[in-house]
Amino acid sequence: MLVIILTNTSCISVHRPTQASFAYISNQGENSVSVINTSTNRVIKTIAVGTAPVGVAVSAALHRAYISNVESQDISIINTQNQLVIGTIKVHGSPVGLALSANSKTLYVADWFTNRVLAIDTYHSEVVRELNIADAPAGLVVSPDNQSLYVANRDSNDVAIVDTATLTIKQRIAVGKHPYGIALSTNGLWLALVNVQDDSVSLINTNTQVQQQFKVGYHPYCVAFSMDDKTLYITNTQDDSVTVIDVATTKTIATIAVGNTPEGISLDHEYAYVANWGSSNVSVIDLRTNKVVTTIKTGEKSRAFGHFILNQ
């Protein structure tokens, strides 16, 4: 694999009294990433990346943001300390979803068109393993103990549980129609994924594999847990809303109007950030009130598929 790394990849570990958080928003329509300082809710930089960027994964340990570029068939590596692209990983496929292992040593990539999952060594920035997974893998997430990788396979209508040590499939769980975005609770107990064509979310107990399905908005796209694992936030692309669900009861707490065609969503302790593909902006939701408090203009066709908020 051709890899271009232009700067030293060593990590710098320095204690800072206050450290900024940043949101990395992929803009598919203009081949860029908007970097938002979440303290000020302003775009501090727009970074040119590959063609048709979609997926995002971030690592505080590595000071890196990884961006999947579907049409140029590569992954851009951004140094989050200076907001510069420092390398490109060619994958010879169509990367969509991205997820990092808890120790940041491995970047997992869902290759949408060739039905593969790739495992990339982040220290050498090269593909080291791959797995033929199912039809149209999309969202993926790694368990906190690094032992399991969960992959939502859109056209197979299932979630695959992959053993990360061997990169082999341990189990498949049938879900709804066209699963796409996926999330795991902080404690690793609950797996949530959207079923786009069923307008529903599957909530799976990872210990028992018992599954609950419940309705949300029209054509859900992504899902995220609150930091305390008590609440789910789901973007609904065709009714321009976010559904808020109580995890314990699976009841709807609120429905929040956001921008046009909301896709990616990530949360910190106080706010949810929602990338709106149709209106090319980001809605910021106050988690205490479930109200939109501001809207941030980003680039054309913002997607931000994956976990995109980095606490430095």
Image (spheres, rainbow, N blue to C red):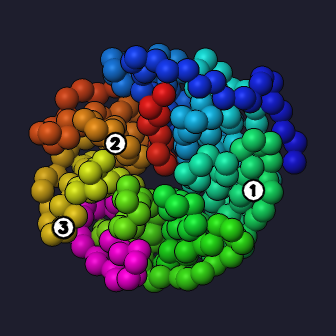
Crowd class of label 1 (few under 14; some 14 to 19; many from 20; radius 10 Å): many
What label does residue 93 carry, if any?
A: 1
Mark closest to the chain's N terminus, 3 or 2 = 3
Marks 1 and 3: in contact by CB < 8 Å? Answer: no
* Residues at marks 3 and 2, CA–CA distance in whole angstroms: 19 Å
- Give how far across and how far down residue 6 sits, in percent: 80, 24
Q: Range of the magenta residues?
A: 203-220
Which residue sits furthest right? 2
- Residue 206 within the magenta-colored segment of the rendering: yes
The x, y position of residue 243, in whole percent, is 22, 55
Instruction: Classify residue 172 as left or right of residue 189.
Output: right
Quick one: 156 or 267, which is closer to the camera? 267
Q: Quadrant of residue 171?
A: bottom right
Looking at marks 2 and 1 on the same chain, the residue that comes earlier in the sequence is marked by: 1
**Residue type beneath disc 3:** Ala
Dot 3 and dot 2 residues touching (CB under 8 Å):
no
Question: Which residue does the numbered mark 3 point to in the structure image?
Answer: 248
Q: Give yes or no for contact between labels 2 and 1 (Cβ–Cβ under 8 Å).
A: no
Q: Is residue 239 visible?
A: no
Q: Residue at x 55, y 75 (%)?
A: 160
Residue 172's disc number: none
Position of residue 201 measured from the top left corner of the image (x, y, whole percent): 32, 68
Please tell me which residue lies in front, 207 or 300: 207
Distance, label 2 to label 1, CA atoms, is 30 Å
Q: Which residue is mark 2?
A: 267
